[in-house]
Image (spheres, rainbow, N blue to C red):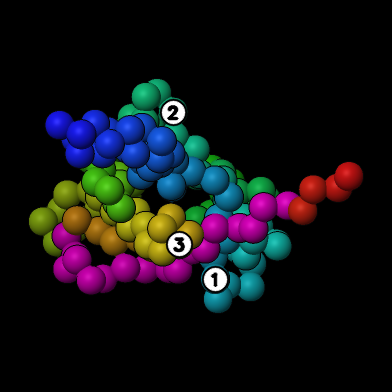
Amino acid sequence: MRLTLSALLLCAALPAHADVFDDASGLWGLTGDDELTCQLNPHRVTFFDDNKRASFRWEHLMTNYLGEPDQEGFYTVLDHGDDYIVLALDGEQRRTLEDAPVVWIMRLSEGGGRYCWGRTDWPAEDCLDGYARCPAPVPIS
């Protein structure tokens, strides 16, 4: 009984692990891209409506997959796990081979320090674009 009580006290003293939505939220930049870096045009990922919706908003206009100027995309959260979130882009026009709208998987790595995009119709190891968490601004005091 003492071991169990000690284990419970130890667990109560440890900080709670952030969930995948906390890990995915924040400011991100695309590594290896001259225009979408943390310095030039980062994007902020935000979850809302009890983590059922997501917003990806760039600081400045960028060119979306349709070749159009854009600044924000909204997604519906379909599923999630410890290190991934399955998302459907509002107005998605890309289609799978089965002619269904593409469904995206935001795959987090390095303890929430990086992410890339997979698709539900791709092999699990396929992941596009390497995003890195932008460093926090240095406080001025």
- Which residue is identified by label 3? 114
Is residue 125 a member of the stretch shown in magenta?
yes
- Which residue is identified by label 2? 48
**Residue at position x 24%, y 46% from top?**
81
Q: Can I make out residue 78 in this image?
A: no
Q: Mark 2, mark 3: which one is toward the viewer?
A: 3
Q: How many other residues sit within 10 Å of disc 2, few (<14), some (14-19) or many (≥20)?
A: few
Placement of the C terminus among the 4 image quadrants: top right
Mark 1 residue element: loop
Give, as a three-letter code, the residue at label 3.
Arg
**Pointer 2 with pointer 3, Cβ within 8 A:** no
Is residue 128 positioned above or below 95 on the image?
below
Extreme residue toward the top, this view: 49
For marks 1 and 2, give the CA distance.
26 Å
**Residue at position x 37%, y 62% from top?**
109
x and y percentages locating residue 75 in the rendered image: 38, 39
Mark 3 residue element: strand
Give, as a three-letter code, the residue at label 1.
Thr
Mark before the other along the chain sequence, 3 or 1: 1
**Residue at position x 16%, y 60% from top?**
121
Relative to 99, is 56 on the left or the right?
right
Placement of the N terminus among the 4 image quadrants: top left
Extreme residue toward the right, this view: 141
Q: How many other residues sit within 10 Å of disc 3, few (<14), some (14-19) or many (≥20)?
A: many
For marks 3 and 1, give the CA distance.
10 Å
**Part of the protein shown in magenta:** 121-137
Is residue 132 a member of the stretch shown in magenta?
yes
Mark before the other along the chain sequence, 1 or 2: 1
Mark before the other along the chain sequence, 2 or 3: 2
Q: Mark 3, mark 1: which one is toward the viewer?
A: 3
